[in-house]
Image: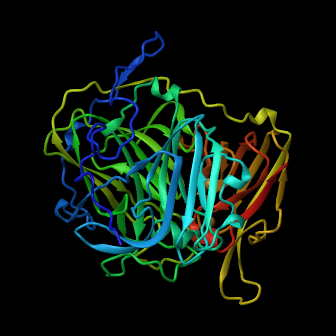
């Protein structure tokens, strides 16, 4: 049994270091010519808090931290992903049992290019059926990882399609029936980065200035390694230990430079409220469906399971020795469960990643004002409306297990729940009548978030552009413009709280 090795020593390997990176371009380029490409500096005021040490309980000293590692990078060109039981180093030399693809935790980072063929073979040696879904991509239905395509141990599944999606931060994970939560938790999940020419022209930070990171919480119960047992299907599994790219309590050595952080919330149920502890804003340039039109500065970003954000992190004014924490700040979601303080509660603060500035460099830290021009479905073109209501009910037979449902339905693999005409724009509304937050995810397309009423009562600044997952708090109604233009076929709408999904909070959507 091979274990994963830390190829980075906690520093992002340079593009030319031979550390398994596939990089097509040098890091930091002068921003593209063209009169319109005005530049803004993203440095500025707010230096006072640099390097401040937090005294909040629960935040740890950096001695307890482990170097962040990066998954080996692969290209989807006749790639084989071998799924097998194994183990992985989760930091401080601790080997944790894990379910792995190609024996690495997290799964290999797939770096692909728009327009290229995507040819991957999944070889399943796990004791349970498995199928992989490319979250955010819009391939033909047999390539999308619907649970009906899961393969048993000893079998393979071939994916072969042309990658049609724009540059962005996508990911992939198990979509096996009833087992998505367990498989993803144990390690069957990786990042999938798509590049294209448009994005390359912007000269965003790349190579060792690009940090792909999968953030997850894990439940330790005092044990040395995480375990997936007795998940609470009401709230989903919540842990109190932060992991980054499979490493417990990660830290990363950085230079005084501008970085691009591609952040995926790969947790089963945990919602993060991302913020820097130095009170500098987060500079958002992209989300689920790729780059936004222009960058947005926000103090904090709520990132639910399945969602991604692309951030610029400017450390050009930091000083060697500074330590900056990327935290998940405390927040409250009314659950109606009563006041009882639970250790694993949603909204509990976590310190996710420590950035330790160790080297001074002199690089330009600028970004173009205009990033991209995503094509959003236009609500003016809408020809019909469709509504989805989320509720919970006791299981009809056992009367004990609580089921999260959509329109009163629990998932059935062979039932078609919604028939949606190909190419027509529709308004979909998600109404949450239940006491838990639901990050709702749609396969086969991206949508445009139009409004949110009740609850937070607005579209959040990080919900612009093209989304494939949207968080719906209790009492909220979120409206979207949706249009399927990629492929006809049977796809899925589900909650990306993986325990909710596994108890049946999912519907089959037939695009016809
Ligand atoms: Cu990331 Cu159907 O899921
Ligand atoms: Cu998906
Ligand atoms: Cu849910």
Colouring chosen for the image of the structure = rainbow
In percent of width and height, residue 178 lies at 63, 74
Q: Residue furthest top?
A: 35
Query: Residue 25's image quarter?
Result: top left
In percent of width and height, residue 226 lies at 38, 75
The residue drawn where x is 62% and y is 73% is 152
Image position of 101 with respect to 45: above or below: below
Residue 453 visible from this viewpoint: yes
Horizontally, residue 54 falls left or right of residue 299, namely: left
Q: Residue furthest left?
A: 321
Horizontally, residue 45 falls left or right of residue 464, namely: left
Image position of 455 with respect to 481: above or below: below
The residue drawn where x is 50% and y is 59% is 81
Q: Which quadrant is the N terminus positioned in?
A: bottom left
Pick the front one: 415 or 284: 415
In percent of width and height, residue 375 lies at 66, 31
Q: Ligand 3 lies in which image quarter?
A: bottom right
């Amino acid at each position: 049994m091979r274990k994963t090795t830390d190829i980075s020593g906690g520093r992002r390997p340079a593009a030319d270091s031979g550390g398994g990176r596939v990089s097509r371009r040098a890091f930091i380029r002068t921003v593209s010519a063209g009169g319109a490409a005005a530049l803004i500096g993203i440095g500025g005021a707010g230096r006072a808090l640099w390097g401040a040490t937090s005294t909040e309980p629960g935040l740890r000293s950096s001695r307890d931290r482990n170097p962040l590692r990066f998954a080996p990078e692969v290209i989807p060109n006749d790639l084989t992903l071998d799924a097998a039981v194994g183990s992985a180093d989760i930091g401080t030399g601790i080997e944790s049992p894990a379910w792995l693809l190609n024996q690495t935790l997290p799964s290999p980072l797939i770096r692909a290019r728009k327009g290229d063929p995507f040819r991957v073979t999944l070889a399943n040696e796990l004791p349970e059926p498995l199928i992989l879904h490319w979250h955010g991509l819009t391939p033909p239905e047999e390539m999308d990882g619907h649970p009906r395509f899961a393969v048993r141990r000893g079998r393979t599944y071939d994916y072969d399609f042309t990658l049609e999606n724009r540059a962005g931060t996508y990911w992939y994970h198990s979509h096996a029936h009833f087992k998505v939560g367990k498989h993803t938790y144990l390690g069957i999940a990786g990042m999938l980065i798509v590049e294209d020419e448009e994005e390359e022209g912007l000269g965003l930070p790349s190579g060792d200035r690009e940090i792909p990171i999968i953030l997850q919480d894990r439940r330790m119960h005092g044990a040395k390694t995480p375990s997936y047992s007795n998940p609470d299907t009401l709230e989903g599994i919540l842990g109190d230990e932060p992991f980054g790219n499979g490493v417990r309590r990660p830290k990363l050595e950085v230079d005084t430079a501008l970085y691009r952080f591609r952040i995926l919330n790969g947790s089963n149920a945990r919602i993060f409220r991302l913020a820097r502890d130095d009170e500098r804003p987060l500079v958002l340039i992209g989300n689920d469906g790729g780059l936004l039109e222009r960058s947005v500065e926000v103090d904090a970003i709520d990132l639910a399971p399945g969602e991604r954000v692309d951030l610029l992190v400017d450390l050009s004014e930091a000083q060697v020795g500074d330590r900056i924490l990327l935290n998940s700040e405390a927040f409250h979601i009314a659950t109606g469960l009563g006041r009882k303080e639970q250790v694993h509660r949603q909204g509990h603060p976590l310190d996710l990643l420590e950035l330790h500035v160790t080297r001074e460099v002199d690089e330009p830290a600028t970004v173009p004002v205009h990033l991209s021009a995503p094509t959003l479905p236009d609500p003016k073109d809408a020809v019909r409306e469709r509504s989805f209501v989320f509720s919970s009910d006791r299981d009809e037979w056992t009367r004990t297990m609580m089921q999260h449902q959509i329109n009163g339905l629990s998932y059935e693999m062979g039932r078609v729940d919604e028939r949606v005409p190909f190419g027509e724009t529709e308004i979909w509304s998600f109404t949450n009548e239940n006491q838990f937050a639901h990050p709702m995810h749609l396969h086969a397309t991206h949508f445009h978030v139009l409004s949110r009423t009740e609850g937070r009562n607005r579209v959040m600044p990080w919900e612009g552009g093209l989304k494939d997952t949207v968080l719906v708090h209790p009492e909220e109604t979120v409206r979207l413009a949706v249009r399927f233009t990629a492929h006809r076929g049977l796809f899925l709408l589900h909650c990306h709280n993986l325990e909710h999904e596994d108890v049946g909070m999912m519907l089959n959507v037939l695009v016809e």
